[in-house]
Amino acid sequence: MNTPVLSVRDLVIDFEGRPAQPALVQGVNFDVLPGQSVALIGESGCGKTLTSLAILGLLPPRMRVASGSIVLGGVDVLRASERKLRDLRGRTIGAIFQEPMSSLNPTMTVGDQIGESRRLHLGESRRSARVKAVELLDRVGIPNAGERARAYPHELSGGMQQRVMIAAAIACDPAIVLADEPTTALDATVQADILQLLEDLRKDLGLGILFVTHDLGVVADFCEQVVVMYAGHVVERAGTDALFGTPRHPYTEALLGAVPQAGRARTMLSVVPGRVPPSGSLPEGCRFRPRCGYALEPCRHAQHGNTSDVHFTFCDRVADGDLVLGSKS
Ligand SMILES: Nc1ncnc2c1ncn2[C@@H]1O[C@H](COP(=O)(O)OP(=O)(O)OP(=O)(O)O)[C@@H](O)[C@H]1O
């Protein structure tokens, strides 16, 4: 059996010392297999970032993982020491964020930054790390890599900076890369090149990739599995073709609303009327109910257990043909 490189189970994230306050993320479940690309989608405030930060062991100070498990490359992230977490970040998981300049050190050459990761995590010598850094820059498509290795980040274009970030992320041969809106800040043509690079690395290195994205084109073109989050819950998890072809949850359907089915043009999530409820004022029953065009009385009483796999009890029964919905209002 293919062992997941990342396994998230029944993840609950809440505020430390505030038991009365509802969890920010509740009952999130998904896996990333070696060489698999998985997308985490949902509107702003649905819990994607907190889930990603928990995976990296980097939740903000007042927050904690209240229950559940995160296993990264066979290591239990929630029981790992700070030292072990630092080792995991780099050796097992690489991270790429939207703004490369906020992650790159402006005072170090890009070659030294990439090399430093190998020296730190793999104990490589300065000379060998330098050679490897040039190889990596070449691998991510930076021309004249030997020369560019001596450049500082601000001397490179946004696209080149993002390539440097990718080289740094894969410097220690991680099993998985977390790519949080990796192309949002880039021009459209550069976006396509960076996404293609990630796809090539996935195939060539057998890298798992967890994309956090608002871009449905990225999902359609580059991801095999999709996890849809709404108000801290996973509402749907499916293969990409199934999700685009027959979305089961009304929230997924609403998000995909603007996507032409044929050709799947590169497009962002559809604008769904209304707002994601903040964790302090969640509606009773299904959290999507106030915005849902299909909502019926039973949706007020939909129960969400922490351990249920996907949070759409009522809609699940609808999708299974168990219940018939009235027409969409
Ligand atoms: N530092 C924080 N302090 C208080 N609440 C927070 C904090 N960070 C996130 N939250 C709350 O946690 C919930 C999930 O937020 P999160 O940032 O994970 O959403 P997201 O889906 O990643 O949004 P985005 O796409 O904008 O990054 C939201 O209700 C948000 O208001």
Image (cartoon, helix red, strand yellow):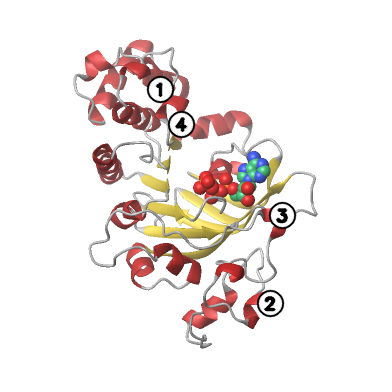
Residue type, mark 1 in image = Arg
Vertical comparison of 215 with 93: above or below: below
Q: Nearer the viewer, mark 2 or mark 3?
A: 3
Residue type, mark 4 in image = Gly
Pick the quarter of the image with the N terminus.
bottom left
Q: Position of residue 259 (x, y in %)?
A: 33, 63
**Real-space Cα distance between discs 2 and 1?**
53 Å
Q: Answer with mark 1 or mark 3, whichever residue precedes in sequence.
A: 1
- Residue 150 showing in the rendered view: yes
Q: Residue 114, located in which quarter of the rendered image?
A: top left
Vertical comparison of 255 with 214: above or below: below
Q: Residue at x 62, y 70 (%)?
A: 286
Q: Secondary structure at mark 3?
A: helix
**Pointer 2 residue:** 301
The numbered mark at residue 212 is none
Residue type, mark 3 in image = Gly
**Pointer 1 residue:** 118
Q: Nearer the viewer, mark 1 or mark 3?
A: 3
Left or right: where does residue 7 sit relative to residue 141?
A: right
Vertical comparison of 145 with 209: above or below: above
**Real-space Cα distance between discs 4 and 1?**
9 Å
Q: Position of residue 70 (x, y in %)?
A: 57, 48
Q: Position of residue 228 (x, y in %)?
A: 48, 60
Q: Residue at x 32, y 16 (%)?
A: 155
Neighbour tally class for label 2: few under 14, some 14-19, many 20 plus, Cα within 10 Å: few
Residue type, mark 2 in image = His
Q: Position of residue 202 (x, y in %)?
A: 30, 44
Q: Is mark 2 within 8 Å of ligand 1?
A: no
Q: Answer with mark 2 or mark 3, whichever residue precedes in sequence.
A: 3
**Pointer 4 residue:** 90
